[in-house]
Image: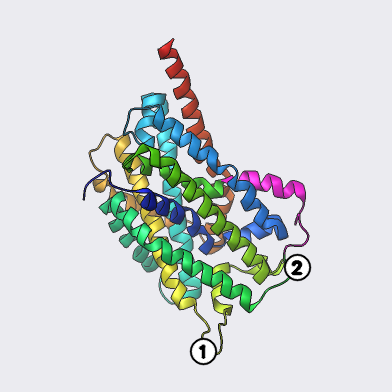
């Protein structure tokens, strides 16, 4: 398969799936715990910071040699030592995303779907196919994501629409500011890390056909991801009004269980479980791919494939570290969803700023 032949649709699809898959986990409940009936507003405020990530990534790429990825551009601008330190931070971010999504979704399966199956077997059942897809490269990931995105979005639309039709609380968004104005606004700023997976664009846009298509793919990804997250939180509040919403472990799974489309169409979670599995494997594949590519480019290796197997062992080892389901969820919510913006916004903007200063010095 030829390189540099990934288009707008594929790039946007990879970004959307990488960002929105977290809604299948306890994220909606966590947002309601923080913002109450104003949880949707946290998503709105967080999305306002997402363009900063895009501008930072684009600025880094345009201040480096043509065809550079985020990793090679960062090293070119910041130098071998500081650049390697920043790139190691990017690797840590994608590595954390990989083992956290693996453990959290495995806990969903082990707790509510197949409770008699050993957790280790579930972990490997998700990790092995994800590693195979990551081994195939970003072109394969892009095409799989583009084929899958329609199924994911349509299933989510049916799920949320069916849940609201089955049960809806008219005053679900009252009071307007939920747990308080200051709490909601400050949480929205901190939770800008909800869109930190947008950092994947640093690996995607060098593989696009035309540079003028970068912005289109980025804005499509930001807009659709934001709308999906926003609609999910609002629908969740209408279906499970506060404070009931903070007692539901896996919101979308519970919504799928209460849907009734008539006497003969009930308990449709088995249909949506297939979509969730596909979505999770794709996100895990993207995280594994970005982790291995980051390492391979830091080590100046020609390809990322030789690193897949050793990294797969490391991801599995870290995935079994949390002592319980809630411990795994807390690792995600208390660290990745609090400090994720440092990786996705602060570091690209810092690198971009240094690149601008160095360019000015060369011209003067």
Q: Is mark 2 on a helix, strand or loop?
A: loop
Residue 250, above or below 330: below
Farthest-out residue, top: 364
Of residues 10 and 87, the one drawn nearer to the viewer in this rendering: 10
Query: Residue at (43%, 51%) from the top-left corner?
Result: 15
* Structural distance between the alpha carbons of marks 1 and 2: 30 Å
Query: Residue at (76%, 54%) from the top-left corner?
Result: 177
Is 143 magenta? The answer is no
Ranked by sequence position, the earlier of labels 1 and 2 is 2
Farthest-out residue, front: 212
The quarter holding residue 252 reads bottom right
Residue 259: x percent and y percent? Answer: 57, 79
The quarter holding residue 255 reads bottom right
Would residue 350 appear left or right of 208 to someone viewing this image?
Answer: right
Of residues 38 and 110, the one drawn nearer to the viewer in this rendering: 38
Q: What element carries label 1?
A: loop
Residue 116: assigned label: none
- State the quadrant of the C terminus: top left
State which region is magenta: 173-192
Residue 95: x percent and y percent? Answer: 41, 48
Main SS type for the magenta part? helix
Q: Mark 2 points at which residue?
A: 171
Residue 195, above or below 178: above
Q: Name the residue under label 1.
A: 264
């Amino acid at each position: 398969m030829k390189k540099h032949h990934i288009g707008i649709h594929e790039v946007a699809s990879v970004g959307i799936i990488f960002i929105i898959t977290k809604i299948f986990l306890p994220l909606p409940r966590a947002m309601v715990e923080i913002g109450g009936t104003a949880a949707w507003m946290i998503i709105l405020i967080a999305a306002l910071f997402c363009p900063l990530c895009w501008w930072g990534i684009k600025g880094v790429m345009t201040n480096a040699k043509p065809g550079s990825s985020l990793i090679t551009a960062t090293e070119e601008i910041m130098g071998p030592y500081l650049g390697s330190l920043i790139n190691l931070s990017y690797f840590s971010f994608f590595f954390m995303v990989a083992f956290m999504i693996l453990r959290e979704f495995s806990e969903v399966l082990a707790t509510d779907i197949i409770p008699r199956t050993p957790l280790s077997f579930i972990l490997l059942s998700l990790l092995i196919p994800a590693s195979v897809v990551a081994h195939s490269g970003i072109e394969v990931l892009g095409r799989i994501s583009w084929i899958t995105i329609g199924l994911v979005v349509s299933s989510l639309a049916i799920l949320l629409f069916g849940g609201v039709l089955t049960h809806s609380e008219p005053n679900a968004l009252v009071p307007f500011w939920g747990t308080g104005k200051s709490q909601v606004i400050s949480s929205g700023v901190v939770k800008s890390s909800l869109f930190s997976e947008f950092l994947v664009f640093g690996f995607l846009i060098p593989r696009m056909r035309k540079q003028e298509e970068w912005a289109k793919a980025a804005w499509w990804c930001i807009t659709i991801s934001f709308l999906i997250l926003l609609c999910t939180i609002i629908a969740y509040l209408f279906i499970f009004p506060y404070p009931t919403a903070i007692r539901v472990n896996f919101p979308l799974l519970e919504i799928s269980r209460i849907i009734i489309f008539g006497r003969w169409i009930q308990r449709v979670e088995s249909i949506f479980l297939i979509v969730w599995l596909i979505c999770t494997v794709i996100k895990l594949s993207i995280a594994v791919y970005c982790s291995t590519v980051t390492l391979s480019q830091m080590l100046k290796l020609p390809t990322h494939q030789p690193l897949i197997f050793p990294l797969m062992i490391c991801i599995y080892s870290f995935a079994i570290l949390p002592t319980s389901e809630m411990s795994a969820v807390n690792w995600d919510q208390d660290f990745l969803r609090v400090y994720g913006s440092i990786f996705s916004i602060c570091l690209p903007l810092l690198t971009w700023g240094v690149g601008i200063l160095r360019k000015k010095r060369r011209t003067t």
